[in-house]
């Protein structure tokens, strides 16, 4: 049904996205650790994808197969693997010392790092600790801080570690205690630092079940030096922050519900206009994105998209002006285009919704209040995987 002109004034537009920035291959070798996953056309190792058929795939599959944990050095462009210099399959952890030797072998003096993507954490940690690490990573995005689980190996922002010593003691059937000792010569007077690891034998091999940090890592924030207890504190803080953010959103007139992500919200008179996602920004990929207009008691319009690049999808862009960014998101419905925008370059800042039919502006809703922390940015950040990045079009807002 074609919308009546009077109902058009109640509609806001779709979520915005920023034009994708051109990526060039990283000239420096990149080290990748991850599980190989294969598909019909595209495959991946860790977060880096590559074509299932081609020279990169030939080198990967010569050493590794589906579900293998592999260690690779190569060239990347964005999140695409474009070249392989070296790749080896990580052997199963048959002994309790094996996982610790593998991790610490990656740190040489002041060089090296270690990171596993969310889907690969179970290859090193037990299910219990994997669950805590995943939840703490989500919490750290809410809190905008680094989790203690991000890098428990060195315990420092800078390092030059030497004299790494790994000892393992059997403490019962299928259980062991690992102690890793080293000195960090970035410190003025480096002293031996020891980190203790609880190790458990599982059907898939030995896994890390918990970490006990050295006494030097104590802080007022955490009552325990065990990583599992620290992660629980972070998770609780993240949950509280999320509840507070949702409560503020509800108080400000957002039409997004508890647990949903908010891309755009503004109000005009008694009406609210929101663009919501199936989960928070850190919970990508989103399964849906939806524009809503009306009041919490009664919506005038709800438009949902579940697949980018199809009819009714959301498109967006942003541009950097002299005094701030101008961003918008649009979608089409029954012959009309709806454009939600935020203009940070004006004083006071403006936000609202423009409704167009063809080349004509049918209506413009100027909001008296608005808020957003997730609209597209000129830096290239998109608030949802369901928003398609397009070139900025000045005419949409005229």
Image (tube, rainbow, N blue to C red):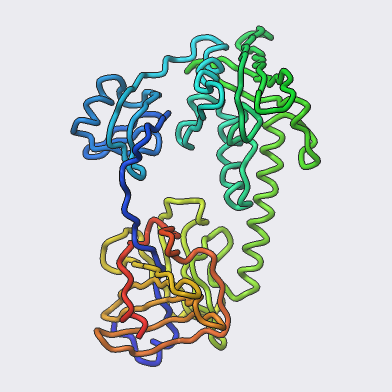
Left or right placement of residue 235 versus residue 287 in this view: right
Quarter of the figure that contains the N terminus: bottom left
Q: Is residue 329 above or below residue 188?
A: below
Residue at image location 32% in from the left, 66% down from the top: 313
Quarter of the figure that contains the C terminus: bottom left
Residue furthest to the front: 188
Left or right placement of residue 262 versus residue 1 in this view: right
Residue furthest to the left: 54
Q: Which of 361/250 is in front?
A: 361
Image spot of residue 258 (x, y percent): 58, 62
Q: Which of 166/174 is in front?
A: 166
Q: Which of 254/102 is in front?
A: 102
Q: Is residue 284 above or below residue 354?
A: above
Residue furthest to the bottom: 6
Q: Is residue 328 above or below residue 55?
A: below
Residue at image location 25% in from the left, 86% down from the top: 359
Residue at image location 44% in from the left, 74% down from the top: 321
Image spot of residue 54 (x, y percent): 18, 33
Query: Hey, which quadrant is residue 86 in on the image?
Result: top left
Image spot of residue 144 (x, y percent): 61, 51
Query: Hey, which quadrant is residue 353 in on the image?
Result: bottom left
Residue at image location 68% in from the left, 43% down from the top: 234
Count of picture labels: 0
Q: Is residue 53 above or below residue 332?
A: above
Image spot of residue 113 (x, y percent): 51, 30
């Amino acid at each position: 049904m074609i919308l009546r002109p009077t109902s058009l004034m109640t509609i806001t537009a779709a979520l915005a996205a920023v034009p994708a920035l051109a990526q060039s291959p990283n000239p420096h070798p990149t080290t990748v650790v991850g599980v190989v996953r294969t598909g019909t056309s595209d495959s991946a190792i860790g977060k880096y994808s590559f074509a299932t058929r081609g020279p990169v795939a030939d080198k990967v599959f010569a050493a590794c197969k589906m579900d293998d944990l592999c260690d690779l050095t190569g060239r990347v462009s964005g999140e695409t693997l474009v070249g392989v210099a070296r790749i080896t399959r990580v052997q199963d952890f048959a002994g309790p010392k094996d996982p610790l030797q593998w991790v610490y072998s990656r740190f040489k003096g002041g060089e090296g790092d270690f990171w596993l993507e969310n889907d690969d954490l179970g290859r090193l940690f037990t299910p219990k600790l994997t669950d805590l690490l995943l939840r703490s990573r989500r919490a750290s995005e809410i809190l905008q801080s680094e989790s203690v689980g991000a890098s428990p190996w060195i315990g420092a922002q800078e390092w030059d570690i030497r004299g790494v010593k790994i000892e393992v003691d059997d403490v019962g059937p299928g259980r062991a205690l690992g102690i890793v000792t080293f000195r960090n010569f970035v410190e003025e007077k480096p002293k031996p630092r020891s980190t203790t690891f609880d190790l458990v034998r599982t059907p898939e091999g030995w896994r890390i079940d918990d970490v006990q940090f050295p006494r030097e890592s104590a802080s007022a924030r955490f009552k325990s030096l065990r990583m599992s207890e620290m992660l629980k504190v972070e998770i609780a803080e993240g949950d509280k922050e999320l509840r507070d953010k949702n409560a503020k959103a509800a108080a400000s007139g957002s039409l997004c519900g508890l647990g949903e992500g908010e891309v755009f919200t503004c109000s005009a008179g008694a009406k609210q206009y929101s663009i919501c996602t199936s989960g928070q920004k850190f919970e990508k990929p989103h399964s849906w994105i939806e524009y809503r207009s009306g009041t919490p008691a009664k919506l005038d319009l709800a438009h949902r998209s579940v697949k980018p690049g199809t009819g009714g999808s959301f498109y967006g862009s942003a541009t950097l002006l002299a005094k701030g960014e101008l961003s918008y998101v649009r979608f089409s419905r029954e012959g009309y285009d709806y454009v939600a925008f935020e203009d940070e370059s004006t004083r006071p800042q403006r936000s609202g919704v423009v409704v167009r039919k063809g080349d004509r502006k049918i209506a413009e809703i100027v909001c008296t209040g608005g808020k957003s922390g997730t609209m597209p940015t000129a830096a290239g950040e998109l608030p949802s995987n369901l928003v398609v990045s397009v070139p900025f079009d000045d005419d949409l807002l005229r």
